[in-house]
Amino acid sequence: MNAGKMVCTACSCLCDDIEIEMENGTITGIGNACRKGSAFLFGSQNEKQRAGYLAKGREVEVESALDAAARLLSGARRPLLFGLDNSTLEAQTLGIELARKLGGVLDDSSSFCHGRLVEDILAGMLPTCTHEQIHDADLIIYWGANPHNAQPRHLSRFSLYAHRKYHEAGVKRHVSLAVVDVRESETAGVAHHFFRVLPGEDRDFIAAVIEGIKGKPVGKDAAEFLGLLEKSRCCVIFAGLGLTYSLDNDFSLFYELIGHMGKWLKPAVIPMGGHYNARGFNHSLYNATGYVNKVSFAGGRVAHGDEFSLLEQVRSRAADCLLVVGADLFSALPASLAALLDGVPVITVDPFYTATAGASTGVLGAALSGLEAGGTAVRMDGTVVSLAPVKTPRHLSDEQILKRLLEKLG
Amino acid sequence: MSKRDKLQPLQVFQLLPGTNCKKCGQLTCFAFAFALIGRENKPEDCPDLLTEQYKSSLDLLNEYFGGEVSVEKTGLLIDQEKCCGCGDCVAVCNKCQGTVLFGSGVIIPRNVPPVLKVIDGRVQVVCWESCKRCMNPPEYCRVCEERCPFGALELVR
Ligand code: SF4
Ligand code: SF4
Ligand code: SF4
Ligand code: SF4
């Protein structure tokens, strides 16, 4: 039986052309999804990988798991809510409400990823565009990103190969692909131009290009890069984690370059978020508070600052209870930091039984967005995508879980 | 990049005995090299390769051509282990089927069903008749092979 099309939520491409074949409620075939997406969807049927409802390590009924989680949260004085990048916009809104009600701290992975770029895009300080506008571009740059690993279908669905004027055999090339990275990644291997920078030296490369713009003599790579920019009239830069890490979240020089480029071409920057609704989280929180992450609701008012980032909260042992929604915190944190969470009760909401779920006091298994639960999400380029489930869920959705928690907290 | 490295016919030839003894059924060792690449022969079809003297050559050849593979009717060999299902080959194949209007960048599509499709996360040939290599006369297109970032595709004929 063909159950029709669905949206894959395994990465921030949110591919909406996934064909699903089902027999007796089990997926038997998947069309168009990449290996990552297919493994995610098939994996969701492996009951061993899925999270159930646990309280203090024991399997319990949904209701008691919710009660136990609500008790932990209401008893906490400085609760920290982390995640929501893999939740729908609807669930994110409820998550923000929950953090507000608890007077807790709220953060997501964007505080150490692309949050800064999204914030500046939302504030209108950084030019951007959507994937649909890629057809105007004559130069596509992946900077510090290897989509073939993280967002495998990005080139074929949204960038080079989706470009109306891309053709291998054309007499004139209408759109070029350039990659700036520390290694010759898969994407770099198929790029028309590849610029290798040494690890951590993106800043020097940018500075050299800016020098070149000012008419000063520069090295071969910077000159070649500048040559591409000079020929371009519209350029889209996909900013990956490599760029963020290399610049250590200080994008001033990068913005200066974009500013210079704006004098003769139309530049646009799209941050390549990883989780399917990471950008959505930034949008939701920005709409609610004016900040994209690192927010505290303590004392009934909104505060923002680096001290409210997950890493600082863990480092300073600030939180006395942790609610993690759709993030595998314990796999991501270095062991030395994870050790600081010893003794802090953790509640995990996740479709999968992750390492974090394994280390949690309470576990609330959730339905898989896109497959088993609906809602809306924001693709990496800022486009809203609606998710329509094709399978009957056995778990509550994270939206329902957060709603129930809110109700229980009164 | 090692992932995309491929053995060239001359390199394969250099691993063979070079006596042109015809015992493999091919007229020359060079023809055998092509037959290996096209997966029409297996390394053990050459008796001399099985002797001690050629052990290292045989090991190397087996590494490349020893495994059980199925070559599609288009001559396309798909390495399911390497393919990540990115769909780049699907997209470029669909594009290369069209004709570019000179200078304008506008592409007129050739209305045929797609050759390739990603199923369960790996690419598969679903309509080989659409491949330009199956046209009459054939067009020796290699776009899908050239654009695969993982070296998962090889046109062996
Ligand atoms: S590219 Fe991302 S969204 Fe698209 S099928 Fe692959 S994992 Fe899913
Ligand atoms: S059997 Fe071996 S040595 Fe003889 S022609 Fe064939 S490849 Fe060459
Ligand atoms: S064969 Fe290569 S280009 Fe085609 S889907 Fe697989 S990895 Fe992508
Ligand atoms: S050889 Fe050309 S026409 Fe045939 S499948 Fe590959 S890209 Fe398509």
Image (tube, helix red, strand yellow):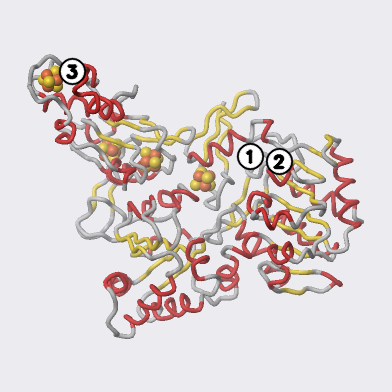
From this view, report whether residue B66 is shown above or below residue B146.
Answer: above
Say which of A249 and B147 sits in front. A249
Mark 1 neighbour density, 10 Å: few (under 14) some (14–19) many (20 or more): many
Q: Position of residue A322 (x, y in %)?
A: 79, 55
Name the residue that disc number 1 marks.
Answer: A371
Label 1: chain letter: A
Mark 3 neighbour density, 10 Å: few (under 14) some (14–19) many (20 or more): many
Quarter of the image with the C terminus of chain A is: bottom right
Residue B46's label in the rendered image is: 3
Q: Position of residue B96 (x, y in %)?
A: 27, 45
Residue occupying image coordinates x 55% and y 33%: A20
* Alpha carbon separation for disc pair 2 and 1: 8 Å
Left or right of B45? Residue A376 is right
Q: Are marks 1 and 3 on the same chain?
A: no
Query: Could you tell me if the residues under marks 2 and 1 are in contact, i.e. CB atoms within 8 Å?
Result: yes
| Number of numbered discs overlaid on the protein picture | 3
Residue occupying image coordinates x 49% and y 33%: B120
Name the residue that disc number 2 marks.
Answer: A367
Residue kind at label 2, given as amino acid type: Ala
Label 3: chain letter: B
Q: Position of residue B94 (x, y in %)?
A: 33, 43
From this view, report whether residue A205 is shown above or below residue A271.
Answer: below
